[in-house]
Amino acid sequence: MARITASVYTSHVPAIGAALDLGKDKEPYWQPVFAGYEYSKQWMKDNKPDVIFLVYNDHATAFSLDMIPTFAIGTAPQFPVADEGWGPRPVPPVIGHPELAAHIAQSVIQQDFDLTIVNKMPVDHGLTVPLSLMCGQPPADAFQWPCPVIPFAVNVVQYPVPSGQRCFQLGQAIRKAVESYDQDLNVHIWGTGGMSHQLQGPRAGLINREWDNAWLDQMIADPAACAQVPHIDYVREAGSEGIELVMWLIARGAMADVTGGKPPAVKHRFYHVPASNTAVGHLIMENT
Ligand code: DHB
Ligand code: FE
């Protein structure tokens, strides 16, 4: 049987990808951001998964106002790195896991979540920046990501967006789906985006350290209560793009304690302001 053994949570910011791609990561502005991921890169080497189920949001790259799936699962064998206006990042394409992705689609749809099946999808900074933060940035030609990745895109860009509760329940369904796969696979689930930030309008630049850290405490200790946080609280307290945080509840919902097992261990926690306009939050949790 396949198992979800760990979850990873991290912000994504396009400027983090640009800092890595342009070799600016040792500069004083960026050094404290990347320092927060030193533990994580070693942890990835020591705890290499067979597959990463990567929950992220597309930023009007693969999708547009033409078509807006709430939850989209990538079932292709490969996903190209998107050109977001400056050419594709110099990182390898993402290798998928079509068999496990198709199985999860079958199981989760039969558990009454309506997923969109996507067989062709360029992946943007929402997916590649978390991979770079966790896996590092060796020379492009020699480098492959450590394992196959199933991209799972959530609409948090165009209203209406899904609630925290819906995301939390979806995480539980994904856990059941993974556990009903007949091959022995070690699966990690990542929840990405957030934390507080607002990129537009009169409140552009908003950061809320206190709210972010209280949200993290509750997300770790009492995810069911955290899932009740209404949409308007995210927007008011964490800014219009702070709503990306509901994606973390998908990963948290897939951890063992939520379905009756033991509480996960928090292996690493990091928070830093700012990276571009964003408060960077990061957690690693292991099922025990
Ligand atoms: C920034 C953050 C994001 O989440 C994003 O998608 C784009 C930009 C930023 O802080 O610059
Ligand atoms: Fe974003």
Image (cartoon, helix red, strand yellow):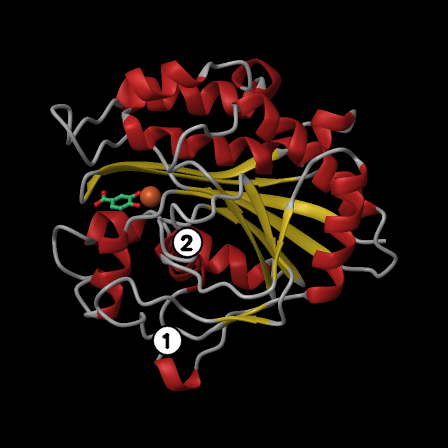
* Res. 130 mark: 2
Number of numbered labels in the structure image: 2
Circle 1 residue: 138
Using the image as rendered, state which of residue 255 and residue 158 is in the foreground.
Answer: 158
Q: Position of residue 26 (x, y in %)?
A: 18, 62
- Please give left or right for residue 183 compared with residue 87 in the image: right
Query: Residue 4: x, y in percent?
Result: 70, 46
Q: Residues within 10 Å of mark 2 (few under 14, many from 20)?
A: many
> Looking at the image, which residue sits at the far bottom?
141
- Amino acid identity at mark 1: Pro
For the C terminus, give its image quadrant: top right
Q: Quadrant of residue 82?
A: bottom left
Left or right: where 247 falls relative to 236: right
Task: Write the residue at 68% across / 54% down.
Answer: 187
Q: Is the C-beta of the residue carrying label 1 under 8 Å from the nearest atom of ligand 1?
A: no
Which quadrant of the picture is home to ligand 2?
A: top left
> Within 10 Å of the Cα at label 1, are there few (<14), some (14-19), or many (20+) other Cα atoms?
few
Q: Secondary structure at mark 2?
A: helix
Q: Nearer the viewer, residue 33 or 238?
A: 238
* Residue found 65% across the figure and 35% down from its top: 171
Which quadrant holds residue 51? bottom right
Disc 2 to disc 1: CB gap under 8 Å: no
Of labels 2 and 1, earlier in sequence is 2
Could you say which is closer to the camera, residue 76 or residue 46? 76
Q: Amino acid at mark 2?
A: Pro
Identify whether 70 is placed above or below 39: above
Of all residues shown, which one is farthest toward the front?
A: 66
Check disc 1 and report its element: helix, strand or loop: loop
From the viewer's perspective, is residue 63 above or below residue 288?
below
Q: 162 above or below 18?
A: above
Q: From the image, state whether disc 2 or disc 1 is nearer to you.
A: 2
Image coords of residue 94 (percent x, y): 51, 69
